[in-house]
């Protein structure tokens, strides 16, 4: 599943971009760092439930950042439709 994120040609990284993708019905799958801020985690997870977008929880924001090939921890990322 994580390799899908790493190799995705269309993806966004970061809470703002993920929220924007969800609100615009452009997210196919969302990845969340287990240790992301509670408010952010629940807001994105709730929106995913509302929009019927599958969520994959990654062990840490650090690991999610690495999966996205960025040098900083990432709270959320999404593969776009």
Image (spheres, rainbow, N blue to C red):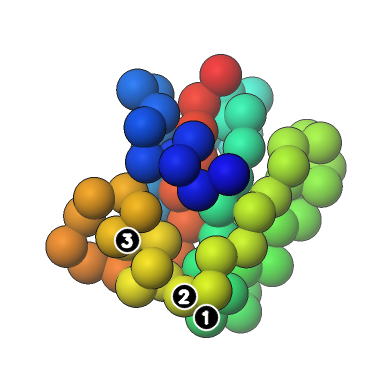
Q: Earlier in the sequence, mark 1 or mark 3?
A: 1
Which residue is at 64% across, 54% downward? 56
Q: Which of marks 3 and 2 is nearer the N terminus?
A: 2
Q: In this orientation, which residue lies closer to the viewer: 70 or 52?
A: 70
Does residue 45 show up?
A: yes
| Secondary structure of the residue carrying numbered label 1 | loop
- The residue labelled by disc 1 is 35
81 over 8 or under it: above or below: above
Q: Distance between the residues labelled 2 and 1?
A: 6 Å
Q: In this view, does 18 lie to the left or right of 56?
A: left
Which residue is at 62% across, 37% downward? 29
Q: Which mark is residue 65?
A: 3
Q: Crowding near pointer 1: few (<14 within 10 Å), some, many (20+)?
A: some
What is the x, y in percent for residue 42? Answer: 69, 67
Q: Which mark is residue 60?
A: 2
The answer to which quarter of the image holds residue 57 is: bottom right
| Secondary structure of the residue carrying numbered label 3 | helix
């Amino acid at each position: 599943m994580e390799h899908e994120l790493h190799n995705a040609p269309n993806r966004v990284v970061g809470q703002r971009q993920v929220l924007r993708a969800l609100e615009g019905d452009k997210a196919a799958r969302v990845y969340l760092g287990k240790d992301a801020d509670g408010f952010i985690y629940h807001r994105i997870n709730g929106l995913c439930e509302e929009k019927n977008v599958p969520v994959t929880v990654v062990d840490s924001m650090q690991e999610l950042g690495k999966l996205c090939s960025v040098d900083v921890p990432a709270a959320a990322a999404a593969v776009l439709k």
